[in-house]
Image (tube, rainbow, N blue to C red):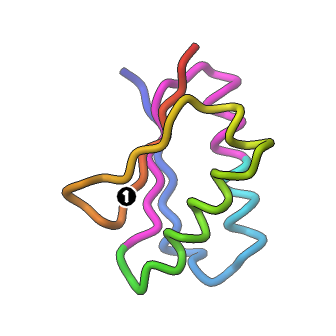
Amino acid sequence: MSKLKLDLHDIYNKGQQIDNALEEIIKEAVDKKIKLVEIIPGKGSGQLKKKVIRFLQLPSIKNQYHRLEKDAKNFGRIFVHFKF
């Protein structure tokens, strides 16, 4: 199964770049019909993870994917599942 991976470590403090990166990876997953996107906000204080989840809850984004999964074993990972 193919998946996309987005590591946000390098841009953790650049709000607009984070939104752009998230938007691009969601669009790419939809365009290429990829069923799983792994987003890595990292562990840190949890602020970036909250920002990512807030972004993914936006109605315009939320209607593009099937479900959201927080990695139970690794706090610094979020999986976005798509259904095609």
Q: Which residue corresponds to the image point at 73% horizontal and 62% vertical from the top-left? A: 19
Give the answer, above or below, for where 77 lies relative to 15.
above
Q: What kind of element bears circle 1? A: loop
On the image, the x and y values in percent for residue 74 come to: 25, 61
Left or right of residue 45, residue 52 in this image: right
Residue plotted at (54% across, 70% down): 50
Question: On the image, which quarter does residue 75 sit in?
Answer: bottom left
Reply above or below: 34 against 49. Answer: above
Looking at the rendered structure, the kind of residue marked 1 is Arg
Q: Quadrant of the C terminus?
A: top right
Q: Is residue 72 magenta?
A: no
Choose top left, top right, bottom left or bottom right for residue 79. Answer: top left
Neighbours of disc 1 within 10 Å: few (<14), some (14-19), many (20+): some
* Vertical arrangement, residue 35 with respect to residue 9, above or below: above
- Bounds of the magenta span? 24-42
Mark 1 — residue?
Answer: 77
User: Magenta segment: does it hold 31?
Assistant: yes
- Position of the N terminus, as image quadrant, is top left
Residue in the foreground of this view, choosing between 83 and 7: 83
Q: Residue furthest left?
A: 73
Q: Residue 12: x and y, percent?
A: 57, 78
Q: Does residue 37 appear to the left or right of 13 in the view shown?
A: left
The residue at 62%/84% (across/down) is: 13
Q: Position of residue 63 (x, y in %)?
A: 71, 33
Query: Could you tell me residue 69's position as x and y percent?
Result: 40, 45
Say which quarter of the image contains residue 42. bottom left
As drawn, which residue projects farthest toward the top?
Answer: 84
Query: What count of labels does the image hold?
Result: 1
